[in-house]
Image (tube, rainbow, N blue to C red):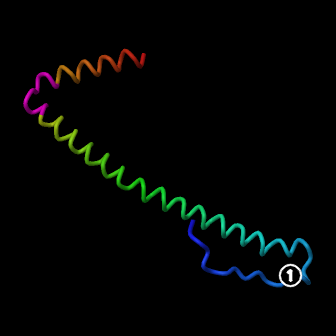
Amino acid sequence: MIPNTTTSHVPNTSLLSDSEKLAPVAADKLDHAVQGAHHAIDRFADSAVPKVRHLAEAGDAWTSSLRSTVREQPLMAVAAAFALGALLARVTR
């Protein structure tokens, strides 16, 4: 965890009513929670970016391979598409 290098200034609330004393404390807690959530999202994004790039590259390679196969064997591709369509139609009934 990153140490907090800033010091939080809590105003003197000795002359305020109890409900008015809670506002600065609640704001400080909310600020702390928001910072924690921001750090968690940053860590998640940093770990997700390489995985998303890898998936995109794998998808591009798969698409390229599929296009090549369809160009080399168009009749088989049409037959496979027909069979897949018939299977999906039967499953969704």
Label 1 sits on a secondary structure element that is loop
Determine whether, in the image, residue 3 is placed left or right of residue 53: right
Q: Which image quadrant for residue 72? A: top left
Q: Assign the magenta stretch its main secondary structure.
A: helix
The residue under label 1 is 13
Q: Residue 49: percent from the left, percent from the top? A: 38, 56
Q: Which image quadrant for residue 85? A: top left
Q: Which image quadrant for residue 16? A: bottom right
Determine whether, in the image, residue 14 is placed left or right of residue 71: right
Q: Residue 63: percent from the left, percent from the top? A: 21, 40
> Which part of the image, by quadrant, shows the N terminus?
bottom right
Look at the image and give the residue range highlighted in magenta: 69-77
> Which part of the image, by quadrant, shows the C terminus?
top left
Q: Which is more toward the observer, 12 or 82?
A: 12
Residue shown at the point (45%, 58%) measured from the top left: 45
Residue shown at the point (91%, 73%) measured from the top left: 18
Q: Residue 91: percent from the left, percent from the top? A: 39, 17
Q: Which is more toward the observer, 9 or 75?
A: 9
Q: Is residue 73 magenta?
A: yes
Residue shown at the point (65%, 64%) measured from the top left: 33
Residue shown at the point (62%, 80%) measured from the top left: 6
Q: How many callouts does the rendering have?
A: 1
Q: Is residue 35 above or below residue 70?
A: below
Callout 1, which amino acid? Answer: Thr
Q: Residue 13: percent from the left, percent from the top? A: 86, 81
| Number of residues whose C-alpha sits closer than 10 Å to that of mark 1, classed few (under 14), some (14–19) or many (20 or more) | few
